[in-house]
Image (cartoon, rainbow, N blue to C red):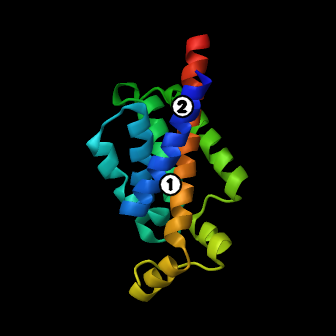
Amino acid sequence: MEERRRESLDRAFELGKNYEMANGGCPQCTLAAVFEVLGIEDEAVFKAATALADGVGLTGDGHCGALSGGTLAIGYLYGREKKDFADIMRLVEANLLAKKLRDRFVERYGTVRCRDLQQKFFGRFYNLYEPAELEAAFKAGMLNTCSDVVGEVARMTVEIILEKRASDTEG
């Protein structure tokens, strides 16, 4: 059982990293990796993740897109359904799990904000709408660094989901 869990976590990391290297779009890459490891397919959720890249809308001004993708995966599995919209308590489970992901992310990286992560990793923020800035970001290693972050968040997300599933079967 432990070996299978470890394999799932390693696969989540590798898929996330490789998707980011090949395609970009950190939230979609994280979500795709998590969904693939867990055997989930949902094109609508994948598509919805598009605009969460680089701190929302490629601005760097929101939290890390990889974290957004992991959070979407958790919400997909444990979130409140429309039929339960009026039940405020149905918010709790998904939000506790999302907080766990956020806390692990902060423990590892020190912040959730994309702009701050770029500052930490590269010593500055890159405006990805400017072609020269985009080129400079790639030269600085943004693709490799962000790919590692995507892989790590995919791993963290799968780990949290597997922990939740294990606790559900024990209880």
Number of marks drawn? 2
Q: Label 1 sits on what residue type? A: Ala
Residue closer to the observer: 37 or 163: 37
| Residue at x 38%, y 38% (from the top left corner) | 36
The residue at the far bottom in this view is 132
Determine which quarter of the picture holds residue 56.
bottom left
Measured along the vertical axis of the image, is residue 158 above or below residue 53? Answer: above
Measured along the vertical axis of the image, is residue 150 above or below residue 78? Answer: below
User: Label 1, on which residue?
Assistant: 66
The residue at the far left in this view is 43
Res 75 seen here: yes
User: Label 2, on which residue?
Assistant: 161
Counting residues from the N terminus, which is met first, the one under dot 2 or under dot 1?
Answer: 1
Mark 1 is surrounded, within 10 Å at the Cα level, by few (under 14), some (14 to 19) or many (20 or more) other residues, namely many
Measured along the vertical axis of the image, is residue 113 above or below residue 139? Answer: above
| Residue at x 40%, y 38% (from the top left corner) | 35
Res 171 seen here: no
* Kind of element beneath mark 1: helix
